[in-house]
Amino acid sequence: MTDEGSDIRKRLESADCVPLALALAQMIGDPSPVEEIAPYVRGPWDYSESIPDSLKAAIRDRAAEAMQAHARGRPPALPRPDPATLRRMMSVAVGEEVGEDYVPMALEQMDLASGEARLVAPPASPAGGRLRALVIGAGVSGICAATQLQEMGVPFTLLEKNREIGGTWFENRYPGCAVDTPNHFYQFAFEPNDAWPEYFSHQDSILAYLRHCVEKYDLRRNLRLGVEVERAEWDAARRLWRATLRDEAGARTQLEAEILISAVGQLNRPSVPDLPGLKTFAGPAVHTACWPEAGLDLAGKRVALVGTGASAVQVGPAIAPEVAKLTVLQRSGAWVARRPNVDRKVSPDKMWALREVPFYAPWYRFQLFWGFADGLFDALRIDPDWDDGGRSISARNLKIREAMERHIRRELEGREDLLDRVIPTYPPFGKRVLADAGWYRMLRRENVELRAEGVERVERGALVLRDGSRVEADAIVFATGFHAGKMLWPMEIVGREGRSQRDIWGDDDPRAYLGLAAPEFPNFFMMYGPNTNLGHGGSAVFLAECQMRFIAGVLRAMVERDLDTVEIRRDVHDAYNEDIDARLKTLVWSHPAVTTWYKNAGGRIITNQPWRLVDYWRLTHDPDLREFVVEATEKAG
């Protein structure tokens, strides 16, 4: 082997063997590596295989030889596997049977055929300049929307209320803030990143990636920062939206556009409990989503952490070593599960493999897609014949519960007194499953106390609990979530009948077709709208790409057919919502043992979708304009 080959072979030691074997099969056009590893793969994670060391070495040897040949100009022998072969490869990759319906999505979205970056929805023809768009919000969804609009040739203005892009990744800067979706799945398909520093990277890395996308696709020339949309109203006579903007100084201006896209999502307005006496508290009281940019000095202080949700399990372990006392005030226990690689850094050689080995990165991404999303979906289905006293909803769900409980018991060995309080009474996935970044180890610390009595009121230097006891505190950290039900709030979006979304939805009953469109609101689209939250894992980036593909398809049709307006038909909208309500009743969030912010006051699930990712990908892939009421331009009419 040449020196170059030896170097390649050495670097391949850091490549996971399963995606490497799949990549090798495509490079050499021989399925034997796939079949050789098949008996040893039990799941999609790097620890869920038992491939013998001798076989791993042989695969790495052959991969190094194939890469040398590739470097000399030999093209891959199997750049695009046939559907049957691809499905077999996908099934081996994750250690279980993958359905035929995943093949088209894998070929496109996951780039398994070529590994080449591509935009989400390449335009069929230039859009020209007849349509203009306003995009509200410059987070993940807004950046996705703006990039696609630019690709289509649709003039747009990207509006952001903050002084910088990033959305949730700009606003959430609390200690320990990190993505809890594997990074190599939490990225745009058109802009894969092989340089993530960690498998679950922290806020600064995510924000840097989003800034990179804004700069690379030259979005800043159409970006306005520090302006908040107060109101947008449909002008029926002129067939356009007129938006009222307020800047940081309070000055108001108006912008007009034919297309309005809300990319503010569901989780953008922090919710702080209205505790009696809170205004009298002497120290800082901050929500995790409102952490001061200059930081918050908590060293040596007594801190009360209110909540045990997604941000709590990150900020708690991050601040516990520096504070004098951390009191965690819990309403109910959460499922905080072991996550592979949660605190590991990505090695330089692994980055090299993701960048240089043909087909390796897309196969690695597909494993994450399955392991963190659709591979879990069956565990959400309620078995009507299953009775476990509310602890689980099916045999599959129980198996996951038992695995999670084993993790908790291992982490809290010696502190069994905490088990009754931390192990949830509801089934897994009833609420968001959280990634354990040291939560249980934190609870074992001498300076950490867990209380579950509930807060009755706040005093100048303490929180008084419902049992009358006091928690002395110098600072309060609220990890208490968002106003998820008040979607689009506090914006006022007024449709063609003079009614706002708030008039129609009230405070907590939002509905939309595919979470994207609603009757009475022509040319208006919502990204991460009602019933689009992914309750079984998944990636918000994938969701944004699906939604923008749909919006782009509608806009293309408007240009090609000379249409001025499109508005989802009420019967289509209503039938869709009846369907998803029925489907949601079969899933874990509807179980009597589950109470969650996913539901509104009437018990209807308003945030989550009942679909696997592949289902939502299919539903949003090719919009059908027969489902819309359309108006042609005057010249076309």
Image (cartoon, rainbow, N blue to C red):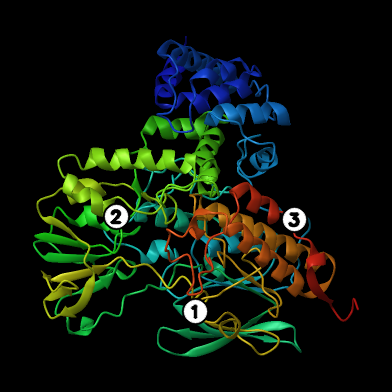
Give the percent coordinates (x, y) of residue 447.
Answer: 10, 55
Can see residue 343? no
- In the structure shown, which secondary structural element does the residue marked by tag 1 occupy? loop
**Which mark sits nearer the N-terminus, 3 or 1?**
1
For label 3, the residue is 622
Query: At label 1, which amino acid type do we have?
Result: Trp
For residue 129, what is the image quadrant? bottom right
User: Which residue is depicted at the point 68% across and 26% down?
Assistant: 85
- Report whether 229 appears left or right of 424: right
Give the percent coordinates (x, y) of residue 233.
Answer: 63, 86
From the viewer's side, name the closer residue of 87 and 119.
87
For label 2, the residue is 313
- In the structure shown, which secondary structural element does the residue marked by tag 3 occupy? loop
Residue 489's label in the rendered image is 1
What's the distance in space between the residues labelled 3 and 2, CA to CA? 39 Å
From the viewer's side, name the closer residue of 71 and 395.
395
